[in-house]
Image: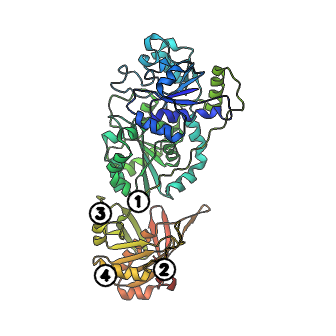
């Protein structure tokens, strides 16, 4: 069996199909890089990552194949021998790409590619819905009888993955925050092309303890731009906590983990709709989206995001809409793709399967986690011993009360101007290289005193000793041990970032006279940050905190 690949996205689609052959030693699979694509560099890298055995294109042309399985009809694939199966490499046919094939014809249904020289290219078009079969016959009437509705194997994996939602969110470090996933297709009408600043704007405006923001890019965009330039272009947003999804499988785990999806006209959002995720329309219009397509109907129903500052309000409206009925026009035979594909593909091979079709497999947990920001612009609201804390990136346009920065990681400018400086204790244990023979370390009490001398604008220095313990030194009020209680609900325990609690205590101390603090401690404060409210104990310094090594 030969699998010609023109792009990483097409390869990823085909990898979701290949489980139908699991356990069959009679099937030998070879991949080849089909020439002529603008995205072949990333396709080659994706093939290498997959561990696939590849053959040169010229060798593939000379060989005889019992089956050719493809997710794109473009290029010289008609020169390959053997029965050919074609799958779409997205959720249906929703747009026409300018300058690629016949004007106004849905990408993937163009007779110029499907009927080269008037001859059908594929023996089987394996589609996801009866509507897609009707579209295919409308544009290519001679293909009647060559199409079959098998379902969508990628959607089936997403549906199976829903039981892993909590696991995915734990891997992402989402906690009780709301995860907003931005999805961008490729090309001049994509979200990233039209609104390149939107990811950074959302990260700067949304409270960091209430929201997590992730970006899912089309594999073609990863290929066109490259990981190096993507990291450079998105650097401020990434430093502030933006999660940039890897192009294979991780995007799907993020959709399962998401609380809402902000999208352009790329069909990834149809998968989100099939999962019942609220969808927000951030498409600025153009010529690519086809009227009447499932994606056009989804965007017509979804509330529109004109400016980043409207997102929290728009999300309220999006949550009221059930997106699943729209997705039903793109996905039929849900949960049946692998059995249906197995029957059709083995019939074309003239073989009987050695085993029943496997169940769709859940996607692996994400490995791209949000980076812990090294600085926060902090807004606090005090009501006696109750403190509400909202944190934003330092570049936020919102009004804030103080800057908190990690020493020295945040850099000299932030360190010298921050009212709150913190440092996290190193993990206990010798580490992978074994214990260090010669070392000098700060104690928590020594470091907090040193920092206040080194940074004259700093009012509070805090050594974060664990998720529940800090030693805090205030310039006017002295030393305190901080203890954080976890939030308990539904049989789970959730913890706030201890650095947020440090800002809460800093605000409380800054509003009180030294005599009032001395008479109140030990005291229990209530700290609210994002969706969580926890109790924070402020006590006289504990000896084990003073000598804790940093």
Q: Which residue is mark 3?
A: 399
Q: Mark 3: few, some, or many residues within 10 Å (few <14, many ≥20)?
A: few
Q: CA distance from mark 1 to mark 3?
A: 15 Å
Q: Earlier in the sequence, mark 3 or mark 4?
A: 3
Secondary structure of the residue carrying tag 4 is helix
Q: Where on the picture, by quarter, is residue 30?
A: top right
Q: Nearer the viewer, mark 1 or mark 2?
A: 2
Taking the image as drawn, is residue 390 in sight? yes
Q: Is residue 306 left or right of residue 135?
A: left
Indicate which disc, 4 or 2, sits on the residue closer to the N terminus: 4
- Tell me if 65 is positioned left or right of 506 in this view: right
Mark 4 vs mark 2, CA separation in Å: 20 Å
Q: Is residue 380 above or below residue 177?
A: below
Horizontal and vertical percent position of residue 452? 33, 80
Using the image, tell me which numbered label, if any, was put on residue 208. 1
Q: In the image shown, does 329 or 199 lie closer to the viewer?
A: 199
Of badges 1 and 4, the one in the foreground is 4
Ranked by sequence position, the earlier of labels 1 and 4 is 1
Residue 79 against residue 246 in the figure, above or below: above
Quarter of the image with the N terminus in it: top right
Q: At numbered mark 1, what does the secondary structure look like: helix, strand or loop?
A: loop
Q: CA distance from mark 1 to mark 2?
A: 29 Å
Q: Which mark is residue 548?
A: 2
Q: Tell me the CA gap for discs 2 and 3.
A: 36 Å
Which residue matches tag 4? Answer: 453
Q: Are marks 1 and 4 in contact (CB under 8 Å)?
A: no
């Amino acid at each position: 069996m030969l699998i010609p690949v023109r792009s990483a996205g097409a390869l990823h689609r085909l990898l979701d199909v290949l489980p139908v052959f699991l356990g069959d030693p009679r099937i030998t699979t070879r991949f080849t890089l089909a020439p002529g694509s603008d995205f072949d560099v990333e396709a080659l890298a994706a093939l290498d990552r997959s561990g696939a055995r590849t053959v040169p294109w010229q060798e593939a042309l000379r060989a005889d194949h019992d089956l050719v399985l493809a997710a794109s009809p473009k290029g010289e694939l008609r020169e390959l021998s053997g029965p050919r199966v074609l799958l779409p490499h997205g959720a249906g046919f929703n747009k026409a790409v300018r300058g690629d094939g016949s004007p106004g014809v849905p990408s993937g249904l163009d007779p110029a590619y499907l009927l080269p020289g008037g001859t059908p290219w594929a023996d089987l078009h394996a589609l996801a819905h009866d509507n897609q079969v009707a579209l295919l016959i409308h544009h290519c009437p001679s293909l009647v009888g060559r199409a079959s509705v098998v379902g969508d194997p990628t959607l089936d994996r997403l549906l199976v993955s829903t039981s892993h939602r909590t696991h995915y969110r734990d891997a992402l470090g989402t906690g009780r925050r709301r995860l907003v996933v931005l999805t961008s297709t490729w090309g001049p009408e994509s979200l990233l092309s039209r609104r390149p600043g939107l990811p950074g704007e959302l990260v700067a405006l949304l409270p960091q303890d209430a929201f997590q923001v992730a970006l899912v890019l089309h594999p073609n965009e990863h290929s066109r731009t490259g990981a190096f330039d993507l990291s450079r272009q998105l650097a401020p947003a990434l430093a502030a906590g933006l999660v940039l999804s890897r192009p294979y499988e991780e995007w799907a785990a993020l959709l399962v983990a998401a609380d809402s999806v902000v999208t352009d006209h790329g069909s990834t959002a149809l998968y989100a709709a099939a999962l019942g995720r609220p969808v927000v329309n951030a498409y600025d219009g153009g010529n690519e989206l086809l009227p009447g397509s499932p994606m056009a109907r989804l965007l017509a129903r979804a509330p529109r995001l004109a400016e980043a500052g409207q997102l929290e309000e728009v999300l309220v409206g999006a949550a009221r809409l059930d997106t699943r009925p729209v997705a039903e026009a793109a996905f039929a035979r849900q949960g049946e793709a692998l059995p249906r594909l197995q029957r059709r593909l083995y019939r074309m091979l003239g073989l009987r399967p050695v085993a029943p079709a496997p169940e769709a497999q859940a996607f692996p947990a994400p490995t791209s986690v949000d980076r812990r920001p090294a600085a926060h612009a902090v807004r606090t609201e005090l009501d006696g011993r109750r403190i509400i804390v909202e944190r934003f990136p330092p570049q936020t346009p919102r009004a804030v009360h103080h800057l908190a920065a990690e020493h020295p990681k945040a850099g000299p400018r932030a360190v010298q101007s921050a009212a709150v400086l913190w440092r996290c204790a190193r993990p206990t244990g010798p580490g992978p290289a074994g214990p260090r023979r010669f070392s000098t370390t700060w104690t928590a009490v020594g470091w907090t005193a040193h920092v206040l001398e080194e940074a004259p604008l700093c009012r509070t220095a805090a050594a974060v000793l664990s998720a529940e313990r800090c030693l805090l030194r205030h310039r006017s009020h002295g030393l305190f041990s901080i203890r954080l209680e976890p939030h308990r609900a539904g049989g789970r325990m959730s913890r706030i970032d201890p650095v947020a609690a440090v800002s809460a205590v800093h605000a409380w101390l800054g509003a009180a006279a030294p005599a009032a603090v001395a008479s109140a401690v030990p005291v229990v404060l209530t700290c609210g940050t994002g969706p969580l409210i926890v109790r924070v104990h402020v006590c006289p310094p504990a000896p084990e905190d003073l000598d804790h090594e940093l």
